[in-house]
Amino acid sequence: MTTGTIDIDAANQTAVARMMAARPQLTGLGRARDVVPGMRDNLLLHAGPPIAWERMSGPLRGAVIGALLYEGLAADEAGAVALVEKGEIDFAPCHHHATVGPMAGVTSASMQVYVVEDAVHGHRTFSNLNEGYGKVLRYGAYSPEVLDRLRFLNTTVAPVLAAALDRAGGLDLRALLAEALHMGDEGHNRNKAGSILFLKLLAPHIARVAPDGDTAGDVLRYLGDNALAVLNPVMAACKAMADAAHGVEGSTVVSTMARNGTDFGIRVSGLGDRWFTAPAMVPDGLYFPGFSSADANPDIGDSTITETAGIGAFAMAAAPAIVTFIGGSPKDAVTATLEMYEITVAEHAHFTIPGLGFRGTPVGIDLRQVVELGVTPRVNTGIAHRLAGVGQVGAGLVRPPLAVFEEALVAFAERYGF
Amino acid sequence: MTTGTIDIDAANQTAVARMMAARPQLTGLGRARDVVPGMRDNLLLHAGPPIAWERMSGPLRGAVIGALLYEGLAADEAGAVALVEKGEIDFAPCHHHATVGPMAGVTSASMQVYVVEDAVHGHRTFSNLNEGYGKVLRYGAYSPEVLDRLRFLNTTVAPVLAAALDRAGGLDLRALLAEALHMGDEGHNRNKAGSILFLKLLAPHIARVAPDGDTAGDVLRYLGDNALAVLNPVMAACKAMADAAHGVEGSTVVSTMARNGTDFGIRVSGLGDRWFTAPAMVPDGLYFPGFSSADANPDIGDSTITETAGIGAFAMAAAPAIVTFIGGSPKDAVTATLEMYEITVAEHAHFTIPGLGFRGTPVGIDLRQVVELGVTPRVNTGIAHRLAGVGQVGAGLVRPPLAVFEEALVAFAERYGF
């Protein structure tokens, strides 16, 4: 389709070709304060589009409180809330600082983050360390054991991983993901294979660089016991891929999808840094014993960057076993992927699905096709409790509101004059 | 079907129920001389049914020579051959000593073996350490680097693995296999996921028990770089499962399938320890660069114990990515599994295939169905060069000769009088 002087199809092919050409490497870790552009001590990054404290959902508020306690900026919950209400804390989307975080995504200045570099396009992206399961900051919990866990990750795990990565000469995350998709992962909610591939690649180095065998054992157990250990570097890799596709004049390819627990927001390659937002939906899924959809917070987290880059729910046909975790049948998993071909502009050159005859995953969401067909992207996700301090209550599937795509398409028409 | 006083169907259900009830645990390692029943210094165990030196194929002869060099019983190839020709070395199938070995399967007295225990039926089974790729004894290579590698495995790796397993309290191989089948493995020729699950479970212990970080690093690299690392314990686990099904009066379930590179042999649950053999076939598959089917040895190895226990080619629908290694299309992988339901008596209670809606793998090969339908079991396999000293030349698919099943069915009819 050529509109006036722009060829949208060609622009979209350029955008998706750039996305697939990106080759993100995990090169190290560093303190957010030292490595994340624009990071400062009174700034908290959060998942999703911009949001003020007043509109933040329970789990995001809980994570903000936890981060302020962790940073020593507040002594207790009341102190943290008072600090925020006095306006002493600034908030910004992770995405505005080249960062992505799962669920609440709250990242503060002294937290260690993974550093991912795409030499092809010169991008550097970041993500914090995955905390594992149970009571964790990213689901809005902030009790003492949550903070102890964060200290363990930042002071014990991160330095060993940084030294191991340095010794390994970095790690090719696109290759890891490609392999994980051949091992039953979809890369968002199922990262079982990817996480143990990560462990496998780093283990020999961890054993050599750790200060002692017990510390090496603790780090290896952290990686091995957490089937989401690799999610955060994978998300940073997906952000590097999506960023490569951003800013192509005339492209309707979606380059960001992210949720803050209140709003679902997208950005579009040809529409600059403007967010299009609408209220986030509550996921459909399986709940942990004792919880139901009445406990669920609306959709939250930057992890939709995986679907934006052509994996996650888009690659679900590669991961039939995921249905034990999110509900549905293996057939539904195949259907999900097949449906996503309808709204994407390419089949991925590097991410392939053995069960579909090694067909490339659907990649490059086209705003136009979403609106025209009324088919919104599928997203696999964890489900947070709607109250601060509780944590994860389940996992399932969700879709963004169609309204954000409609609004973006209107803006696109206005911007490009047709 | 009830024949005279025996109910074959009921006997087969008993046999397969015992196979599925087995719960093999990897409990440790030990020297073959100390742990394998009947092992002695001048005895070499080999894969497949019984065979004399005169009829041994190139790769089996090569492995015999290598083992005699490794044991210090001969100084060079000529000395090894002379020793054998003087009749100073005894040969016996691994299977006669509760052991299984991939490819040539040659196991000698001082080699370390994995110890697998099935407490349910009181069986102990054994398998040597997997050597990885390239020039290796199991494919009939015996150059100095092959022997160095064996020394490294036996003196460096085995003691650390033994201490790590001890510290871990053993490892549930049935659970590991069940998980690996959900991660794209079929458990015979594709053990990528299983091997890194093995690494994951042992890594924290390895780091703690190894004499130093470098040794821990070496052992972790050995496990991580070898996508077949877990094959040998898996084979011992499959033997424990198959042994549990053996010796059921009136059962036509196949309880052993094994090849020595010259003959393919089977044993049957209701027919005691008698082997039924016929010439082994040459596999169909993909060859490494520079090799073709003209270089291929006939089918060799005890690893068909995996298919006997309901995994391997029988579970190939779980492992569509395997076709990159053995040839064919992902659809063929599904077809292979579906065909095996025709000749088996049950669907596995513990090994399930997500892509087939979590259907249990076909398990318990019924001699009668094989002969009646003319459908022989499918087998995934590596392909050895036909000459001693070369090594692996490819991987592919093969089937046993129908004649062994026909002969066994005749024997069954004679034995049970119908």
Image: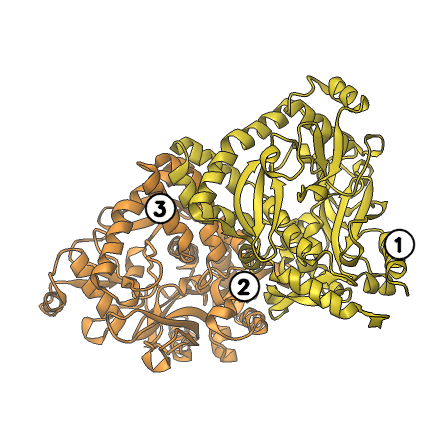
Chain colours: A yellow, B orange
The location of residue B359, given as percent across then percent down, is 61, 60
Question: Mark 1 belongs to which amino acid?
Answer: Glu
Is B211 above or below relative to B261? above
The residue that disc 2 covers is B319
The crowding category of the residue bearing disc 3, from other C-alpha atoms within 10 Å (few below 14, some 14 to 19, many at least 20), is many
Question: Mark 3 belongs to which amino acid?
Answer: Val
- The reply to whether the C-beta atoms of the residues labelled 2 and 1 are less than 8 Å apart is no
Tell me if I can see residue A258 in this picture. Answer: yes
Classify mark 1: helix, strand or loop: helix
The location of residue A151, given as percent across then percent down, is 57, 27
The residue that disc 3 covers is B219
Residue A182 lies left or right of residue A77; in this view the side is left
Query: Between B392 and B3, which is closer to the camera in this rendering?
Result: B392
Q: Chain of mark 1?
A: A
Question: Mark 2 belongs to which amino acid?
Answer: Ala
Is A249 above or below relative to A29? below
The residue that disc 1 covers is A407
In the rendered structure, which disc, 3 or 2, sits on the residue that comes first in sequence? 3
Q: Are the residues under badges 2 and 1 in a single subunit?
A: no
Q: Chain of mark 2?
A: B
Question: Quick one: quadrant of the C terminus of chain B?
Answer: bottom left
Query: Between A8 and A309, which is closer to the camera in this rendering?
Result: A8
- The reply to whether the C-beta atoms of the residues labelled 3 and 1 are less than 8 Å apart is no
Instruction: Identify the residue shown where x is 67% and y is 67%.
Output: A347
Cα separation, mark 3 vs mark 1, equals 56 Å
Tell me if I can see residue B7 in this picture. Answer: no
Cα separation, mark 2 vs mark 1, equals 43 Å
> How many discs appear?
3
